[in-house]
Amino acid sequence: MLQKDTDKTQNAISWEAKEFAEYHKNPSWYATFIFIGLAAAGFLVWQKLYSGAAVVMVAIAVLFSQSSIKPKTNQYMLDANGLTINKKHYSFSEMKLFWSVITPEGNNIYIKTAKKFAAPITLNFGASNPKPIEDFLKKYIPIDEKSSETTTDRISRLFRF
């Protein structure tokens, strides 16, 4: 839920949202996941690629444990000084550009930082309208109309992570 603070010294927009989209996973999702992983590991054992099979088994265990993680609720605040997520602050000088993406799970704004190898900052809105945030960000950093959802988010959505 977006809230606008109309303080005379500076405008601020604050909201809270889940850190990532949460997908319901039924027992058949888990069974399919385990079956595919065991089939891949079995094929690697049959090919006598034992270390590859071990890597697949470790990957199954890690992904299985990660699939049950519930998203935390983050507190977001955007003001003239930059963006604050929970207690972590990002100044506008650290940001290069942003873009907005609408997916079936909700609306996201991605912010590319000046750090070369850093993943973009993702602002989740669920079903809320990101337009006020876009309008605010346009005052400080350029918008990229051509970019789309990140590859990691696409993969997460595809496999319902």
Image: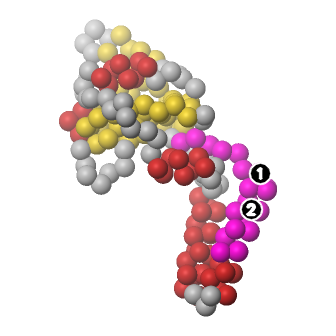
> Where residue 94 sits in the image (x, y, percent)?
23, 40
Badge 2 crowding class, 10 Å Cα cut-off, few under 14, some 14 to 19, many 20 or more, is few
> Where residue 121 sits in the image (x, y, percent)?
38, 41
Badge 1 crowding class, 10 Å Cα cut-off, few under 14, some 14 to 19, many 20 or more, is few
Residue type of the residue flagged with mark 1: Asn
Residue most toward the left? 93
Residue most toward the bottom? 48
Looking at the image, which residue is at 74% across and 56% down?
Answer: 29
Report the residue marked by disc 1. 26
Q: How is the image coloured?
A: secondary structure
The CA distance from mark 1 to mark 2 is 10 Å
When asked about the image quadrant of residue 63, the answer is bottom right
* 154 horizontally vs 111: left or right: right
Disc 2, SS: helix
Check residue 22 for magenta coloring. yes
When asked about the image quadrant of residue 132, the answer is top left
Disc 1, SS: loop
Residue 132, placed above or below residue 30: above
| Label drawn at residue 1 | none
Looking at the image, which residue is at 56% across and 50% down?
Answer: 156
Looking at the image, which residue is at 65% across and 75% down?
Answer: 40
Q: Which residues are magenta?
A: 20-40
> Where residue 31 sits in the image (x, y, percent)?
77, 62
Residue 103, placed above or below residue 140: below
When asked about the image quadrant of residue 8, the answer is top left
> Where residue 110 sits in the image (x, y, percent)?
40, 37
| Label drawn at residue 32 | 2
The tag earlier along the polypeptide, 1 or 2, is 1
* 9 horizontally vs 154: left or right: left
Q: Main secondary structure of the magenta part?
A: helix
